[in-house]
Amino acid sequence: MRIVFVGPPGSGKGTQAKFLCDKFGIPQISTGDMLRAAKSEGRLPPEITKAMESGGLVPDSVVIGLIEERTQQPDAAKGFLLDGFPRTVPQADALSAMLSKRGLALDCVVALDVPENLLIERAVLRRTDKRTGQIYHLSYKPPPPDAVIEHRVDDQEDVVRRRISTYQAMTSELLPHYERLGLLRRVNGVGDVADVTQRCLAALGRV
Ligand code: AP5
């Protein structure tokens, strides 16, 4: 299974990706997580850190390089779920070229739809456990007392609003691109996490 998850900030890509990857035994490959890991290890150039923290996009060449390398690791041989990549048509074209060179193709692009007011509430109140990467929410899924909690720098409300605008600008081209290729499945991302998982599985034809 080679799946792409597209959706605005806070739509639940990371939350749903974990369930699906466990079920299918494939790795979750998140460009956001890889960039944050590089930043915490001091490997991210300052201009890229600035782009992320201000709600903009990182240059295509940087994320394409990350994906090219990561998707060739042995654990991705049976498939993978790309969370947050591609975000632009040039990224989508690069992905398709790198897969076709290996005789592979995408199976499906799942786009999670969530209205803007919910996105802001979800992102601003999100907290992550630094050690495990587990995603929590202060209202819907409060972290346990022993969690080592982190609040993402780009989850401040003004930055979340900018990330949503960036997403809207970019998907005006990306989603029609995947629709034309017959790969796009739109999923309503509002409701219980388990209900959204069922809708994702239905979109993938795996119920
Ligand atoms: P990235 O880390 O990919 O961030 P994002 O796309 O903005 O998505 P988020 O991680 O904010 O949200 P999510 O959809 O995963 O939601 P989650 O499951 O956590 O990217 C960060 C930055 O890196 C970008 O801004 C950009 O600068 C750069 N970047 C990354 N990829 C790039 C690329 N390809 N090209 C260029 N730049 C790139 O859920 C959110 C919250 O909601 C959680 O608290 C969760 O518990 C809660 N929640 C989830 N589902 C539900 C539900 N059904 N009901 C109630 N609460 C829920």
Image: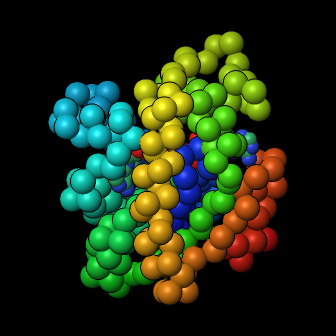
- Please give left or right for residue 136 compared with residue 159 in the image: right
The residue furthest top is 145
Q: Position of residue 153 (x, y in %)?
A: 43, 27
Q: Quadrant of residue 41?
A: top left
- Please give left or right for residue 17 compared with residue 94 in the image: right
Between 72 and 177, which is closer to the camera in this rendering?
177
Q: Is residue 176 above or below residue 141?
A: below
> Which residue occupies 68% across, 52% down?
115
Q: Quadrant of residue 91?
A: bottom left
> Which residue occupies 66% across, 35% down?
121
- Please give left or right for residue 45 compared with residue 128 in the image: left
Q: Is residue 99 above or below residue 85?
A: below
> Which residue occupies 48% across, 32% down?
158
Q: Position of residue 141 (x, y in %)?
A: 74, 30
Q: Is residue 134 above or below residue 176?
A: above
Question: Where is the C terminus found, in terms of image quarters?
Answer: bottom right
Q: Quadrant of residue 195?
A: bottom right
Asked if one can make out residue 169 in the rendered structure from this viewpoint, the answer is: yes
Between 164 and 26, which is closer to the camera in this rendering?
164
Asked if one can make out residue 80 in the rendered structure from this viewpoint, the answer is: no
Question: Where is the N terminus found, in terms of image quarters?
Answer: bottom right
Q: Is residue 166 above or below residue 93?
A: above
Between 174 and 104, which is closer to the camera in this rendering?
174
Q: How many marks?
A: 0
